[in-house]
Amino acid sequence: METHRVFIGAGSNLGDRTENLTLAGQLLAPAVSILRTSPIYQTQPWGYSDQPDFYNLVWEARTTLPPQSLLSYLKAIERKMGREETFRYGPRVIDLDILLNDNLCYQSDNLMIPHPQMIKRRFVLQPLCELIPDEADPQTGKDWRTLLAEAPEENVRKLPFSLDLSRKVIRWGVKTYLMGIINLTPDSFSGDGLLQGAEDPLESALRKASAFLEEGADILDVGAESTRPGFQPVTAEAEQGRLVPVIRRLRERFPDALLSVDTSKAAVAKAALDAGANWINDVSGGLKDATMTRVAAETNAPIILMRWQPLSEKTETMPQVLREAESLATHALSTGVPHNRIILDPGIGFGTTPQQNLDILRDLAAFKELGYPVLLGTSRKSFIGHYLQKEVDRRLMGTAATATAGIINGIDIIRIHDVQYLADVIRMTDLICR
């Protein structure tokens, strides 16, 4: 495939402008790979003055998408981020424009390259000149430094901070987020527990985390107690001893990574948060330890509450699932956890039969209607093995099918073991369904 060097202008003047630009940059991947980011410039609005100032920048990037497909891709990102068409030059949560594509001069009914207005706009030329001041405009033949000197005067001010694309922005509804599983256990059902081998678990965890982040994981979920049937419970002290050194090292090594601690013990969760974790993932829904939700409330940490009670086979599956999940959320709210810090998990494989797991997957849209972000954890689970007659190390494609079903039904996070192989499935399904 032919690769194109493109320059994309981005602007925002609604909400958290820096966060909007960061999220837009993150949503460009993988179809558009950012090579360099200009400084951010604050500019007065152009064309309609009664609105907040814009933050503007330019990205140098590469892509194999042809111009019209690239335009559609950028417009889809704008829609995902909530841009609404109002009036010409009106306020925008995000604005993405193709400025240059190689040295191409291109025109269609809805796209012109180079962008026809860019040589008149200092808020485009100023960041562009930070990247390619001496390169020539394909139409006029003048270099961008000269065109900037000739452009009309505008109030354009370079801001004293730069965009940090490594700082993960979580905004529900714009994409499906990937949570990579790091098991610090000797008895994980999936066979990937880092205490099962002879290697140093700390170094193994760092290698796995590095690989997961490189492969596209948005969140790392670190746990130190198995929840497999017949698992051996560990004390809070032992669990904390496994977790805290790893969390601390992960935070040092990957300062911007989102780290989730998989535990049902409040003391362990608090120690992990103090060591650098960001989220709590509690498979007991905040009920096993009466102080768990209080820890989440006091630290303002997002908490994932999983439904887990055994379901009756004598009544419909989803009403039971919804009642339990809603009860968990109500309990968390009553202890001070804000609504926007609660994430629900329907508990695939916990207290369920294989058929009930299928029932839940078929009706995840109803689970979404509870009004909370939803995490789906089906990776390598036994119901996939039952239906496909596959052992745990051969359930990748079955897991991919369940992930796809989840995305179609609007779930927000997929918790997986095989980030390398499932990231593309999740990204592609997102492109089609979101």
Image (tube, rainbow, N blue to C red):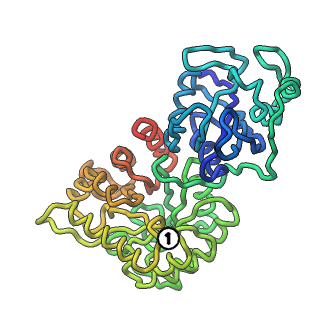
Q: Quadrant of residue 51?
A: top right
Residue 45 lies, in percent from the top left, at 69, 39
* Relative depth, front residue between 233 and 416: 416
Identify the residue shown where x is 59% and y is 20%: 111
Residue 138 lies, in percent from the top left, at 76, 16
Q: Amino acid at mark 1?
A: Ile
* Relative depth, front residue between 186 and 154: 154
Residue 7 lies, in percent from the top left, at 70, 30
> 249 left or right of 380?
right
Identify the residue shown where x is 88% and y is 24%: 146
> 165 left or right of 402?
right
Identify the residue shown where x is 28% and y is 70%: 324
Q: How many marks?
A: 1
Identify the residue shown where x is 59% and y is 41%: 92
Task: Determine crowd level at label 1: few under 14, some 14-19, many 20+ residues with C-alpha closer than 10 A.
Answer: many
Tell me the residue that label 1 is attached to: 280
Q: Quadrant of the N terminus?
A: top right
Q: Quadrant of residue 29?
A: top right
Residue 381 lies, in percent from the top left, at 34, 58
> 3 left or right of 288?
right
SS at mark 1 in the image = strand
Q: Quadrant of the C terminus?
A: top left
Residue lying farthest to the front in this orientation? 50
* Relative depth, front residue between 344 and 109: 109
Residue 217 against residue 157 in the figure, above or below: below
